[in-house]
Amino acid sequence: MRKSSKVLALLLVALFAISVFAGCGGSKEPVDGSSAVETTSDAENKENDSTTSDATGSGAVDSDATGSEDKDGPDNTASTSSGKTGVSVGGKKLKINKTGWPIVNDKVEIRVMGIGLPQYGDAKEMSMFKWYEKQTNVKFNFEAIAGGEIAINQKKATVMQSGKFPDMFSFYTNTFSEFEIDKYGKEGAFIDVSKLVEDYAPNIADELDNPIQVALNKSSGGAIYTIPNKPIGDHSLEYEHWLSINKTWLDNLKLKVPTTMTELRNVLRAFRDGDPNRNGQKDELPMAVWIWNDTTVLSGWGINGTGDISVDKKGKVYYARTTENAHQACIYWNQILNEHGLMDKELDGSDGNGQFTKFINKIETGTVGVFNWSYITEWKKELLDQYIPIPYPTANFVNPELDLPKANQPFSSMLNRGCKIITRDCDYPEVVLRYYDYFYTDAGIMLSNYGSPENGYYKQKSDGSYYLTEKAKGVDFCKNHGLSYTMRAHEIVNMDTLLDKSEGTDSPHGIAYERKAAEVYAAALKKDPRPVFIYNRTAEELAKLRKFSSYEGGSGKMSRFVEGFDDLAGWTTWVNSQKANEEACVKLWQSIVDKHKDNIYLLDGDLKF
């Protein structure tokens, strides 16, 4: 891989990396990642005859109309070695231009199988693909699978059994399990992209300079079958809900922002008893939650918010739900929930009976002191002006057996394995990589989110950053212009420069609030780093771990103790019932961690704003 000047200090990002692409192809013998095509560099294009156009200029769009600097096409830093491997395809050689546009001089169609839901729109009608096809001479044909993960997995299983694959899969990150990727890769069903990215996808190659990306995407034997996701830029954070507190109420009661769980309890009591909104009525709700997930329950006690198998700062493996930290957390929140007036019983944290709607409606009344939520961009400025985002307070509980942060700040979107897989039935994997590589640039991210640059919804500033125009207000980009959420690995937070939405959004105050939350949590992580272990397990390891699957996912046990469905007096009995399997699982995980200790990282919040 090329050596990148960038060093990714964090690992944050995305996400469930979700994408929509589609298609099918014919069966072939397993390949090593190199297709039989002829390639040309910029230097060669300038010397070739009319059968190969000048890729440094052909197909470029005028920058005055688009606000884009990419007159020379996507990625002008690719290798200029010729590397010709051409054979006759359909009676003539296919030439792939390694740099500039078009990617190929003769139109190529790529068949991709992906996710199709009504809210994601129709890819065939998106301005993004219509514009990009003109520039690249590459057309993506989609087989979009409607329905949830069950339908997607059923279709995937059918296709894999048939032996006839699309050129590329683009599903959720967990649609193909680690086991399946390792298995099908070894069988030759998937192409090892590590042998191609250097020449055809320099931006993706940069990602694979990062050892974290390699750890996530490398299968046994060193092959990389999943195209890595682009992590978020160093100007932003991807986070899963934050705590917000009513600063106006704090000021009215002359209270400080709580930094410990004890202080938080005292603030909630003051909100209940002190008439903080100064209306003479007892109508305040000190705290509201929508659902008692592990993040809400456990974060203040310094343990992994997902509640499953984790590592501490020294690499010791532990099962979060049975720690004394988790026990103390459940006791605390159970007491908060059951103390009169601190939480509305109608907002008990359950995930049903219209709880979410009640939760949002209650907050919008302005009568809630503390809440845990993040999708606030459409809320009124008058409401948001009352609140400030705060880090999770710490319980100051020290477990002598574990080296943990004081609080586990709730970031869910860790950098994760890629979900785009090129199959052996793809005649032109180089074309797919060149096409997709553009989406790792800021211009490509804007294209994939906001559609054709010719639409005028966004422009580029003189410093290279982008901004949304007034024309962008109220436009449903996901349905008509770009893949947006379905390309989660390449959302706006992945840009190298901060997108200015001040003109093109109906909620600039909401955007500003999100930025403030990102700053708050970055600072909290800087003071109190969070340990994570990132390693792509082999099929053999996964086979051994399969019997312990209950320790690698949300069980809902914490919420049951908090809400009283399970009596906290039975905590020790429950912990003892888990011990035999838990100890075997932790021992196996510990052996894996010990072999790969270099894959333990600290999220330190070292971000630029």
Image (tube, rainbow, N blue to C red):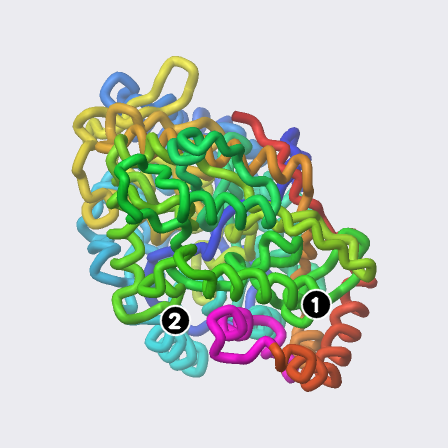
Mark 1–mark 2 distance (CA, rounded to whole Å): 52 Å
Q: Please determine whether, in this image, residue 433 is positioned above or below residue 158.
A: above
Question: Which numbered disc, 1 or 2, marks the residue that appears first in the sequence?
Answer: 2
Q: Looking at the picture, how far across and down is residue 405, in whole percent?
A: 70, 48
* Relative to 228, 292 lies left or right: left
Where are the magenta residues, as a range? 547-568
Residue 524 in sight here: yes
Q: Please determine whether, in this image, residue 168 is positioned above or below residue 245.
A: below
Name which residue lies at 65% across and 68% down. Answer: 327
Name which residue lies at 25% across and 62% down. Answer: 117
* Relative to 63, 582 lies left or right: right
Q: Does the magenta stretch include residue 550?
A: yes
Q: Which of 537 and 242 is in front in this view?
A: 242
The mark lying in front, picked from 1 and 2, is 1
Q: Residue 419 carries which label?
A: none
Name the residue that disc number 1 marks.
Answer: 323
* Relative to 88, 470 lies left or right: left
Name the residue that disc number 2 marks.
Answer: 26
* Relative to 508, 192 lies left or right: right
What residue type is disc 1 on? Thr
- The secondary element bearing badge 1 is classed as loop
Q: Looking at the picture, how far across and down is residue 99, in whole percent?
A: 46, 33
Q: Nearer the viewer, residue 280 or 62?
A: 280
Q: Which quadrant of the view contains residue 66?
A: top left
What residue type is disc 2 on? Gly
Q: Around disc 1, counting alpha carbons within 10 Å, would you say few (fewer than 14), some (14 to 19), or many (20 or more)?
A: some
Name which residue lies at 56% across and 58% down. Answer: 33
Q: Which of 151 and 529 is in front in this view?
A: 529
Q: Looking at the picture, how far across and down is residue 524, in whole percent?
A: 61, 37
